[in-house]
Image (cartoon, rainbow, N blue to C red):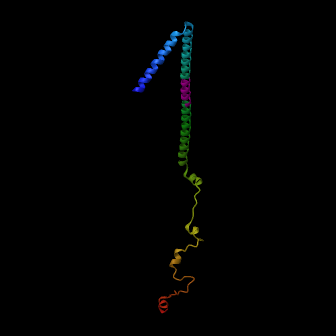
Amino acid sequence: MGKKLAFGLFAGALGAGLYAAYQKLDEAKKTQLKRDARQKADELRDRAVDYAFYAHDAVSDLKDVIHDEMQNTKGTINDAKSQFADKAKSFGTDQTADPDDADDNQDDIVVDAKDAFQDTGIPKAADDLDSQPEKDNGEIPITDDSDHNNNQ
């Protein structure tokens, strides 16, 4: 509260001093001071109006740019939509074409399982059922290491 009171007293004293100094001026200087004050006020008003026009122009330019970009985007979307519609129509006509032509459009690879696994070395099911293995003479060697471990 004391700071506000001190500031108020300072502003009042400054104002009173300026008024007293103004009253001591002669008429020519008073007129010159009034003219300078009006000129500065007019310059400030003109500058403020110029800045208002600059701001209006900038907003107007921004609106134009946004409008142009929106039109460009709409055109791009419409082009993409028409291309998609054309592809969808051509896809539909391709599907309803003659079934004999469908074989020409497809390049299927048909692999027979016997041909695919012939040279891989994977045992065949028939080998598991064979009672006479090719390498064996029919005897199965049996070794019992239990007696050998007990004697030592």
Residue 67 percent across, percent down from the top left: 54, 30
Q: Main secondary structure of the magenta part?
A: helix
- The residue at the far bottom in this view is 151
The answer to whether residue 90 is above or below residue 75 is: below
Q: Judge whether 29 appears above or below 92 on screen.
A: above
Residue 133's image quarter? bottom right
Answer whether residue 55 is magenta in the image.
yes
- Which quadrant does the N terminus fall into? top left
Residue 51 screen position, x and y as percent? 55, 23
**Is residue 73 positioned above or below 37 on the image?**
below
The image position of residue 44, as x and y in percent, is: 55, 19
Q: Quadrant of residue 56?
A: top right
The one nearer the camera, 125 or 24, is 24
Q: Nearer the viewer, residue 66 or 19?
A: 19
Comparing 97 with 11, the one in front is 11
Q: For residue 17: magenta? A: no
Q: Residue at x 42, y 25 (%)?
A: 4
**Nearest the camera: 104 or 138?**
138
Above or below 102: residue 123: below
Q: Position of residue 32 (x, y in %)?
A: 57, 10
Q: Residue at x 55, y 29 (%)?
A: 62
- The image quadrant that residue 40 belongs to is top right
Q: Magenta residues? A: 54-65
